[in-house]
Image (cartoon, coloured by chain):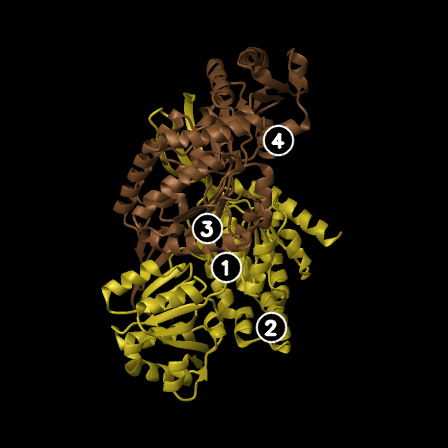
Chain colours: A brown, B yellow
Amino acid sequence: MSIKEEILQIAKEAKFASRVLANLSSGTKETLLLQIAEAIEFNKERIKEENHKDVEKAKEKKFSRAFIDRLVLNEKRIENMILSLKEIANLKDPVGKIESMQKRPNGLLVGKMRVPLGVIGFIYESRPDVTVDAFALCLKSGNALILRGGSEAINSNIMLAKILNEVLQEALLPEGSLQLIKTTDRRAVMEMLKLDEYIDVIIPRGGESLIRTVVENSTIPIIKHYKGICHTYVDEEVDLKMAEEIVFNAKVQRPGVCNAMETLLVHEKIVPDFLPSAIKRFQKAGVEIRGDEKTFNLIKGIKKATEEDWSTEYLDLILSVKIVKDINKAISHINKYGSHHSDAIVTTNYEKSRKFLEEVDSAAVFVNASTRFTDGKEFGLGAEVGISTQKLHARGPMGVNELTCTKFIILGNGQIRE
Amino acid sequence: MSIKEEILQIAKEAKFASRVLANLSSGTKETLLLQIAEAIEFNKERIKEENHKDVEKAKEKKFSRAFIDRLVLNEKRIENMILSLKEIANLKDPVGKIESMQKRPNGLLVGKMRVPLGVIGFIYESRPDVTVDAFALCLKSGNALILRGGSEAINSNIMLAKILNEVLQEALLPEGSLQLIKTTDRRAVMEMLKLDEYIDVIIPRGGESLIRTVVENSTIPIIKHYKGICHTYVDEEVDLKMAEEIVFNAKVQRPGVCNAMETLLVHEKIVPDFLPSAIKRFQKAGVEIRGDEKTFNLIKGIKKATEEDWSTEYLDLILSVKIVKDINKAISHINKYGSHHSDAIVTTNYEKSRKFLEEVDSAAVFVNASTRFTDGKEFGLGAEVGISTQKLHARGPMGVNELTCTKFIILGNGQIRE
């Protein structure tokens, strides 16, 4: 079978399965998710073994610290997977909910019924913990799922998909419910992107070139999960201690993920009180600082930032720093160079907090908190498929509700239009 | 200036204007819309004159009755435009609304703020009444608008855009707030579809080839407004009189629009009681009937439907008719050949009504009413930009709310992530 035929076959089976999954009862879905949690627990060692193969290969290939960090499935990550499955099992089933039913003057009852999207194609980086979260959210929302994970995680993903499918098959669900594209051939993605007859949405997560490829080639609607170039702006009116804790946390706590801060913006008037000590703390923690002209002249032992730095997602212990004249300059820098992901202001001034919230054009806008909180669980949505950086349909952490859509239902008793 | 440069310029001006429009107060927007209503009233005769030119040309070119029907701006249509403007002026402003704010265990307040999409590119058929509705909804929701109407309506659209822009300019709003692409050169659309840096969403309305072109070439997210191949299924358990009224209305009341019925499906057991008299009434009203094998053999003086008929949007006094074994066959016919727009069942059976509502995969699913009701006003949303036939972001009639999106806002007091 050619790749083209193979992917077409996968898409057709997914469409068929989606009709079955759309009609599963909430109880059945809950039970399945709890069984899967048990199966993951039971197969923990096998998962770690397969993951170990992936990690060793990635190390040989000299992938970055951040890359390896995202790839590892250790005891704690697997425990989190299991917790996540149980949490998703307990979420409210969004499917079938009737919203905003109203009676029109002519007696028609008009409302919206929440239904699954259908078939979801998920293209993501080498993060095998995402495999299980994505599947669990798709099952909960009644969607069939086609997975295309990063090739460095292939052994982990094959094992995980196998464990999930064993549970589904015991429950007599169609094979198309969850399919992993096993070939790492790039043409598989290109074929997938044209199958708008069978696939309802493509969710791509990852770097710039992947997202570009998907955007330029897909005839299927997309929910983009683009990089996170996140900023924190430290205002002149500020609690200095709070600002230092927030920016340190945003950069250092887990630098390899998309909601970590990449650029620090500092109001020029607060620079002497704030910047030297903050940078000292960053440097102690091993963070490389790349400053703009002013910062570079002010502080020794740092690098000079280039124009490219302002739009770079380091995903590593590197931070670019820029001194700005006021909040307007901070906001325009963020809207120009950012990736519309997560951005924060630290300030004690009420008007500036409102201005920042209203004018920063990002999926998540923070006042006085670390950008690291952009996350489905932290926002109270349960687990997330990812963090959408586009405006249509879903923006920011995307949970189980965002994997559904609505249709209008209209109940009449013989109404015709005049 | 080349077309490429011209369109780029338009897109940049729209982006600039979108920042201004996003921050207009609800009061200002309401006043502007009422002023526009007055300006339309005042310029009624000029509008009719320009429209007359378009209609005459279209008649010379032998466009169909349905096409001309959509093109005409008569007294009634202009009155409806004005009414629509007043209605939209009075709608609740969706921008700035804070939704589902909750306090998380760590004290963070997490909620969603509703904001405009930004710049909307609207590509639509030769229906000049839509020009004003689309603009009014975009203004109400704080979006800048780039219009590309069907070339047969160009004189009408230029006049309407001129009237709208005079009001905007008096209010000192940027010129990019509303722009009409005046060239009818097809390359203008192709250029527009690549400007994802400036345009946030493309809303294409129209026929299959237009939608295909847009889907295949756009790097901007799309909200599709595809054709309406609408069905009515007459069940065996049915109020015969109600069924006849509903199917007659769905086909004949305004055949040139997307929510008119194109295919009638009839349960085989009700055929003798229902079909001959229904078809007689259709024929009296000048409707051409194209029946499947069984219908063709049963009733004299009708044509035989081809496979192509089942997926054809006639937009005219033509109806395809098929006799089906049961509700399952009806639903699978609709999901296979329909355009996921509007479909109805006429039945007295409760279980079948529920089954139809749940299993028909369309934007609007009706029980015992004419599909002609699929419309923003009829559904209580106020005016509509159109009827989305896709699942993402907006499905079915798309009003002012669907022209906005949300961003997360997070209010902290120093929270960092552990």
The kind of residue on which mark 3 rests is Leu
- Which chain does the numbered disc 3 sit on? B
Pointer 2 residue: B55
- Tell me the quarter of the image containing the C terminus of chain A: bottom left
What crowding class fits label 2: few (fewer than 14 Cα within 10 Å), some (14-19), or many (20 or more)? Answer: many
Amino acid, disc 2: Val
Q: Amino acid at mark 4?
A: Ser
Chain of the residue under label 4? A
Placement of A209 over or under B245, stated as above or below: above
Under tag 2, what secondary structure?
helix
The reply to whether dot 1 and dot 3 touch (C-beta < 8 Å) is no
Instruction: Indicate whether A166 appears above or below A129.
Output: below
Answer whether residue A351 is visible to the viewer in this image: no
Mark positioned earlier in the residue sequence (2 or 1): 2
Q: Is residue B228 left or right of residue B344?
A: right
Q: Position of residue B365 (x, y in %)?
A: 36, 62
Q: Earlier in the sequence, mark 2 or mark 3?
A: 2
N-terminal label among 1 and 3? 1
Separation of marks 1 and 4 at Cα, in angstroms: 35 Å
Mark 1 and mark 3: span between their CA atoms?
Answer: 12 Å
**What label does residue B225 carry, if any?**
1
Please tell me how crowded label 4 is: few (under 14), some (14-19), or many (20+) other residues with Cα within 10 Å. some
In this orientation, which residue lies closer to the viewer: A166 or B31?
A166
Say whether marks 4 and 2 touch (CB < 8 Å). no
Q: Which residue is mark 4?
A: A311
Residue B392: assigned label: 3
Report the amino acid beneath label 1.
His
Any part of residue A268 in sight: yes
User: Label 3 crowding class (10 Å Cα cut-off): few <14, some 14-19, many 20+?
Assistant: many
Identify the image quadrant of residue B262.
bottom left
Identified at 28% across, 78% down, the residue is B270
